[in-house]
Image: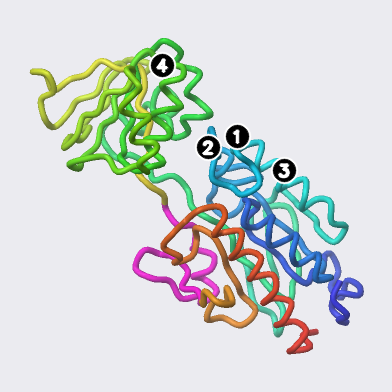
Amino acid sequence: MANLKSTSKNTMKGINNFDVIIVGAGGVGLAAAMYSARLGLKTLVLGASYGSELPIGGVITTTNVVENYPGFIRLTGQELAKKIEEHARSYKLVTIKEEKVLDIKKEKESFIVKTEKSEYKSLTIIFATGTKWKKLDVPGSKKFENKGVNYCALCDGPLFKNKIVSLVGGSDSATKDALVLAESAKKVYIIYRGEQIHPEPINMERIKKNKKIEIINNTNITEIRGDKFVEEIILDKSYKGKKSLKVDAVFVAIGHIVLSELAKKMGVKLNEKGEIILNHKTSETNVKGIFAGGDVTDKPFKQLITGVADGCTAAYSAYEYITKNKVE
């Protein structure tokens, strides 16, 4: 723990004091916690962060196979997330709680963080809130959510064993989802609005070799129909002579929404996409004492490994901020 008066004991009744509070318990937040603890900072990580549907471990938990994280040739996203979590928990100065952050306020040189369960006081804040799934907005998409309309292929794909499913999206993440779905489903239609899906070359080859997967380009879903569950989708262009397609599920992978609302309320500058504008050398924001890392920031290449680097840098910058400014 930093050698500061404010962290030696609670100074406000009912409030726990910390040197660093990390909002977001994905890989980035957990990595930041590891480094802040190594620097002697009393650290609190708050999972179930503002607006996120994901568990501790974050978005990597929804990845079926990870093959690009140094030190591990191949493992599941859940396995990697668990390893990172266990590593963070091994530090005595790290506390991890599954609490949703509702509000953050500045109080003199400190921050008051209010969750659904308690309040905490911290000298610094690190935002590692990441993103949440962007929802499909067509007639029937809301009605059939969790009744055939799904956003996590890894979580819900096995429910559609030997069924016909569709997947909306054309990114590398979308094609990875299609490959996951093909492990259980009888048929997978990738429906993409653009000219051509754009995965990494290795995943494009896997898509081409998989006989279960069929790509429908330059096409949008205009409606999802069914009785109690999804039964068919309506397309804006004919496919094999029909605008309707019989499917048992619609999986959606059309991108993410940045979870930066709490940061915005604190006066943190955002770009036009809602991403936190970061000093990429220091992971500092424009607000003193507030740092950030990972997918919530304006870093163009968004991968767990680059986010972890942000988190480590943010922890070190928080340490420097506390020690140089002698914050109390």
Q: In the displayed structure, would residue 72 be above or below residue 232?
A: below
Give the CA distance from mark 1 to mark 3.
11 Å
Give the CA distance from mark 3 to mark 4.
30 Å
Q: Amino acid at mark 4?
A: Ala
Q: Is residue 200 left or right of residue 11?
A: left
Q: Is residue 321 magenta?
A: no
Tag 3 and tag 4, C-beta contact below 8 Å: no
Tag 2 and tag 1, C-beta contact below 8 Å: yes
Looking at the rendered structure, the secondary structure element under dot 3 is helix
- Mark 2 nearby-residue class (10 Å; few <14, some 14–19, many ≥20): many
Q: Is residue 265 magenta?
A: yes
Question: In terms of sequence position, does the residue under pointer 2 or pointer 3 come before the other?
Answer: 2
Disc 4 designates what residue?
Answer: 185
Tag 1 and tag 3, C-beta contact below 8 Å: no
Residue situated in front as seen by the camera: 11 or 133? 133
Disc 2 designates what residue?
Answer: 63
Q: Amino acid at mark 3?
A: Lys
Give the CA distance from mark 4 to mark 1.
20 Å
Q: Is residue 170 visible?
A: yes
Disc 3 designates what residue?
Answer: 83
Residue stretch rendered in magenta on the structure: 257-278
Give the CA distance from mark 2 to mark 1.
7 Å
Q: Amino acid at mark 1?
A: Thr
